[in-house]
Image: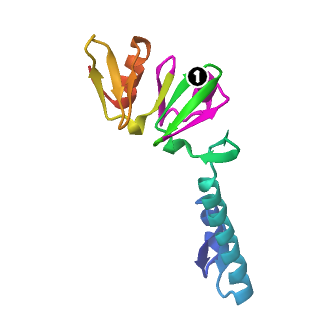
Amino acid sequence: MLVTAYDRHAIRAFEAGAQDYLLKPFDDARFALALGRAKDRVRRVVDRQQMPDLIVRNKGEVVFIRLAEIDWIEAADYYACLHVGSATHLLRRSLSDLERVLDPELFCRIHRAAIVNLRRVRSLAVNEVGDFEVLLDDARLALSRRYRRRLEQRLGVRG
């Protein structure tokens, strides 16, 4: 919203993304209208940010899950197990299907049977047989050779 005494600024204001333009002098009704529009816009943005990204039916209840809260996802036949903190939720979607809709800035496939939230990765380690593993706070996941380079690039590991 822009408030000014000069109408010549209107075009530049809207080009810059202003949602409303109040020209002085204005009355209380015009101000209330502009303020109401601004509040509605803020409310819509907040509502959109609070909406769940995934809806999972689990034991007679419906669970709303935000993608950023997922630690990692594993394949389970035709299902995907979503690991969210200490909870696990079963979703009837394949890993390939989920991989297409997940934000690539936040998630990365590390194995044919696993996708991780990059913000949950604590380190990469070599196990006793020489294979790489991805360490999260509460999990140790196999990192396949096929996906290793992509993960390292996404994490900014130089090799």
The image position of residue 22, as x and y in percent, is 66, 78
* Towards the viewer: 135 or 101: 135
Dot 1 falls on a residue whose secondary structure is strand
Query: Does residue 110 belong to the magenta stretch?
Result: yes
Q: Is residue 111 above or below residue 61?
A: above
Q: Can you see residue 112?
A: yes
Q: Residue at x 57, y 27 (%)?
A: 99
The image position of residue 2, as x and y in percent, is 60, 73
Query: Does residue 54 belong to the magenta stretch?
Result: no
Q: Residue at x 43, y 17 (%)?
A: 147
Tell me which segment is drawn in magenta: 87-113
State which quadrant residue 154 falls in: top left
* Towards the viewer: 80 or 158: 80
Q: Can you see residue 27?
A: no
Q: Quadrant of the C terminus?
A: top left
Q: Residue at x 61, y 33 (%)?
A: 90
* Towards the viewer: 36 or 129: 129
The image position of residue 42, as x and y in percent, is 62, 65
Q: Residue at x 64, y 63 (%)?
A: 14
Q: Is residue 115 above or below residue 87?
A: above
Q: How is the image coloured?
A: rainbow
Pointer 1: what residue?
A: 76
* Towards the viewer: 109 or 34: 109
